[in-house]
Each structure stands twice: as structure tokens, then as C-alpha cells.
Image (spheres, grey):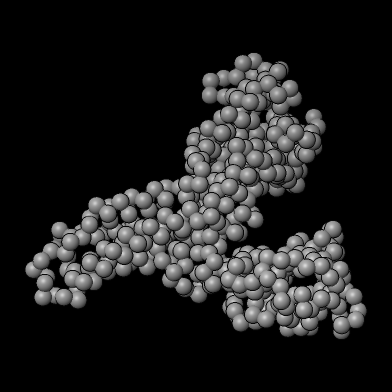
């Protein structure tokens, strides 16, 4: 995708559908004057200061009223994009918003591409690339904790840390450049601050270590309920959701396909999946397909809750063995279900009654222990982008290669520092590569 920065753009910023109010965003050179031409109070709009709201009507051909609106004027560079911008608050409804968009097109606006408003903000220095990525992450956050971490990135927590490291490495790169520019002084050892470079590397390593935490709170984990037929998987699924989502009957094999729902566990998004019961043989082709899919879901899940029908006593352990779950113990939680009817759970099992709720808090506690993200405090910088992690590792590798006392020529020492600078520059967007920018911004929704 290629973005063009010279023409005014417009897009519906709220969800398309029926609503009390819809917001249409515009931005670009000349956008205020263009909208003044279709506004009932053109002089007010043209002469407006930034951060002002004006009431009036949008008009077609200067006469036909399209809608009664509020126009919020922003003057660059004090706007989201850094350009002159107007946000139109009109009545909601697809027919009306389509009419407003048609009216804007008639006076020179084009439809904004996905992420184009944020791309212009980045291009005009309103945010760096880590903050631009945080915009999308805030929109996609599934929990309040995930939103808070993304908001911290938008506020510049990662940008500030990387900026400080960049400045310190630049000072050392300047020393290398000076030594290369004046080779007659090569008998004198360049005065690198090795402690400062070590501190830079450790700062980057600490930031890399937050990657799993960032991904956990943003993307969440998949937790599959697995077990033989009639082990109570659907009942436990409904207990987690506090609603009757899955069908529960005494007839074996009721669940033929999987049912899934998102949960919030201490800020961690969990995709809980109720699967078809596992058994060795079935004459039902549909149930057999459900069993095949269940095994695929188990293989792709981060955590598996393996249920046994505790009411069957020792036979439940045999049922568990016959399921042949190919899951590592670190990803497996054994649940002794129907604890209200069953003998005590065997060692290594958590006794739970999906019917009465007995033992459920213990199960939730164990899930928390298996999924804890070591949540950082306050506005501590956290990354969750594979792109950011790869570039941080590249910079760390370059700093690890930097060895003054190993007889390496000065030009190679300088190259190590330049490689670290290039990687960190690309991370924040100081090094602009078209394919990277397209990848970041094309995944945004239209209107952002």
C-alpha cells in the first residue's frame, strides 16, 4: 500500500451502522476551506482557531440540507495528524454517513486508506513507530490491563527508553568516527566508554525480556477443555462463563464441534474452548470429525484442562490414559470433575464440581499460576511486537560484537555501533523502510 500525503482525506471513524452520532474524520492541506464550501457558516469555519467546535448544516449545492452537524476544527501542527483537520459529528446511520462521504468527495476529498491518519501523524513527527503500533494495540486490547500497557507505549515509554539508548550509542559512534577521520592518531587508543555501552545493552536486554509478557496481555492464551464424553466439559465451560453457552445433556457425544469464548483472568485474555469428547471408537461420522478437530485444538492450545469423570472412580484414570493426550505436563492441568459425587481427587489432580462450584477457585488459581505474565508496574516499558523484538536482538547482537581489546580494526568497531544504531532507528521509525511502514500501518482500521 502506498500513502500519498498531499491530498485531503476523509473516513468514517466510528462503526458503520445505526447510532445516535457518527464521526467522520478529515485531514490534509486545504481541508478546512473545502469543508467551509459545504457548511452553512463558511466564514466562521475559515477563520476558526484550532480546538474549536462549530454548529451548523452541511449543504449540497449551497441549498439542500444534508444534516445538522458539529464541526471540530484542529489546526496543524496541534492535531492528531499534524495537519489541519476537521472532525464531523453527524447523526448516525449508513444512509446519512454515505451521503456525507459523497459530499466530501465532491469537494476534493478521497477515501483514506487503512491507517492513513496514523501514518500522517508518524510522518509529521507526532509519534514514532512504537507509538503508532500502540494505537492499533489499544483498539484491539481485550482486557483493561492490555489496554493500559498499550497506552503506556502510546505515551512514549518505549520511545523514551530507546531514545536514551540511541543518544548514548551515538556518542560512542562519534568517538569511532573521529578515530577514523584522523588515522594519524591511531597510536592513541580511542576513549570508548565501555561501561556506558554495557549499560545500553542491559537496558535493551531487559526490554526484550518483556516480550512474552506483552504478548500475553495483548494476544492472550488458548485454553482447551479436553476429556472423554460426559466428563462435564460443557458444564465447566458454562461455569467459567457464568452462563449456559454450551449444551449440556446426559447423552454422550453432544458436543460435535468446538465452542469458544473469551475470558478475562487478571488482565490476561483467555480463549476458552469446549471440545468434543474423546473416545476410541464411534460409529457417528460427524462425532469422529469432531474428535479429530479436538486433537488439533489440543495441539494448538497453550494450556489444556484435561477432565476426568471423577464419579467413575478408578475407571476415570483408565479413561484418561486411553485419551493419549500428547501434552507436556507444564501445559496440562488435570481436573477431577464431579467432585460432589466422586471420591477424593488422586494426587496431581484438582477436584472440581462443575455443578456446585466446589474446587473451582482452586482451578482458577492454578490457571493463574500457569499463565502469570509478571505484570510490570506503572508505565514500565513493555514490547509485544515481533518486529520490535527482532530489531532489539539485532542491536544487542551488534553491541555484543563490540570488543575494543580484541585487536579488531576501528572501521569494524564503528560498523558494530552503526548496526546497533540502524536497528534501533528502524525500531522507532527513524530509518524509514517502505515495506516496514506498509506492514505496520496497513493492519490498522480505516479512520485510524
Q: Residue furthest top?
A: 343
Quadrant placement of the N terminus:
bottom right
Q: Give the camera-side residue of 3 and 100.
A: 100
Q: Give the camera-side residue of 269 and 305.
A: 269
Q: Determine the residue positioned at 82% across, 73% down.
A: 100
Instruction: Decide: is 201 above or below 415.
Output: above
Report x, y in % for residue 229.
Answer: 71, 33
Q: Determine the residue positioned at 17% across, 61% down.
A: 191
Report x, y in % for residue 267.
Answer: 60, 41
Q: Residue furthest right?
A: 64
Q: Determine the residue positioned at 30% across, 51% down.
A: 199
Report x, y in % for residue 438.
Answer: 55, 71
Q: Determine the residue positioned at 32% across, 59% down.
A: 168
Quarter holding residue 103: bottom right
Left or right: residue 409 versus residue 360 is: left
Q: Give the camera-side residue of 374 and 294.
A: 374
Q: Residue furthest left?
A: 187
Count of numbered marks: 0
Instruction: Decide: is 11 above or below 136.
Output: below
Quadrant placement of the C terminus:
bottom right
Left or right: residue 29 versus residue 175 is: right
Q: Can see residue 229?
A: no
Report x, y in % for residue 446.
Answer: 68, 67
Left or right: residue 349 versus residue 72 is: left
Instruction: Decide: is 229 above or below 101.
Output: above
Q: Can see residue 89?
A: yes
Q: Give the camera-side residue of 58 and 254.
A: 58
Amino acid at each position: 500500500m502506498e500513502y500519498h500525503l498531499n491530498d485531503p482525506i476523509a473516513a468514517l471513524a466510528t462503526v458503520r451502522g445505526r447510532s445516535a452520532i457518527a464521526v467522520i474524520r478529515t485531514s490534509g492541506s486545504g481541508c478546512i476551506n473545502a469543508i467551509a464550501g459545504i457548511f452553512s457558516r463558511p466564514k466562521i469555519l475559515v477563520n476558526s482557531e484550532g480546538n474549536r467546535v462549530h454548529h451548523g448544516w452541511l449543504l449540497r449545492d449551497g441549498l439542500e440540507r444534508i444534516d445538522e452537524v458539529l464541526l471540530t476544527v484542529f489546526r496543524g501542527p496541534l492535531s492528531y495528524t499534524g495537519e489541519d483537520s476537521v472532525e464531523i459529528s453527524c447523526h448516525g446511520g449508513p444512509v446519512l454517513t454515505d451521503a456525507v462521504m459523497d459530499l466530501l468527495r465532491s469537494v476534493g476529498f478521497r477515501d483514506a486508506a487503512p491507517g492513513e491518519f496514523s501514518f500522517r501523524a508518524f510522518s509529521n513527527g507526532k509519534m514514532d513507530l512504537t507509538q503508532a503500533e500502540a494505537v492499533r494495540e489499544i483498539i484491539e486490547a481485550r482486557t483493561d490491563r492490555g489496554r493500559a500497557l498499550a497506552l503506556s507505549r502510546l505515551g512514549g515509554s518505549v520511545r523514551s527508553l530507546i531514545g536514551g539508548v540511541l543518544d548514548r550509542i551515538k556518542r560512542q559512534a562519534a568517538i569511532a568516527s573521529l578515530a577514523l577521520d584522523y588515522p594519524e592518531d591511531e597510536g592513541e587508543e580511542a576513549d570508548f566508554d565501555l561501561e556506558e555501552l554495557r549499560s545500553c545493552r542491559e537496558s535493551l536486554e531487559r526490554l526484550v525480556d518483556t516480550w512474552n509478557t506483552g504478548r500475553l496481555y495483548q494476544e492472550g492464551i488458548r485454553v482447551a477443555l479436553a476429556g472423554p464424553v460426559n466428563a462435564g466439559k460443557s458444564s465447566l465451560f458454562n461455569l467459567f462463563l457464568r452462563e449456559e453457552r454450551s449444551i449440556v445433556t446426559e447423552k454422550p457425544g453432544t458436543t460435535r464441534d468446538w465452542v469458544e469464548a473469551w475470558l478475562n483472568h487478571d488482565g490476561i485474555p483467555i480463549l476458552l474452548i469446549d471440545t468434543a469428547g474423546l473416545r476410541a471408537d464411534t460409529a457417528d461420522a460427524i462425532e469422529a470429525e469432531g474428535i479429530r478437530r479436538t486433537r488439533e485444538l489440543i495441539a494448538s492450545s497453550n494450556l489444556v484442562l484435561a477432565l476426568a469423570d471423577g464419579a467413575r472412580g478408578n475407571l476415570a484414570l483408565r479413561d484418561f490414559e486411553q485419551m493419549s493426550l500428547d501434552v507436556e505436563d507444564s501445559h496440562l492441568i488435570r481436573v477431577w470433575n464431579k467432585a460432589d459425587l466422586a471420591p477424593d481427587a488422586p494426587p496431581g489432580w484438582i477436584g472440581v464440581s462443575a455443578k456446585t462450584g466446589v474446587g473451582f477457585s482452586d482451578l482458577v488459581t492454578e490457571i493463574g499460576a500457569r499463565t502469570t505474565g509478571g505484570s510490570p508496574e506503572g508505565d514500565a516499558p513493555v514490547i509485544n511486537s515481533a518486529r520490535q523484538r527482532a530489531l532489539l536482538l539485532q542491536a544487542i547482537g551488534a553491541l555484543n560484537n563490540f570488543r575494543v581489546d580484541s585487536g579488531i580494526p576501528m572501521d569494524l568497531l564503528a560498523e558494530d555501533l552503526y548496526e546497533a544504531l540502524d536497528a534501533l532507528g528502524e525500531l522507532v521509525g527513524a530509518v524509514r523502510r517502505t515495506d516496514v511502514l506498509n506492514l505496520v500501518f496497513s493492519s490498522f482500521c480505516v479512520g485510524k
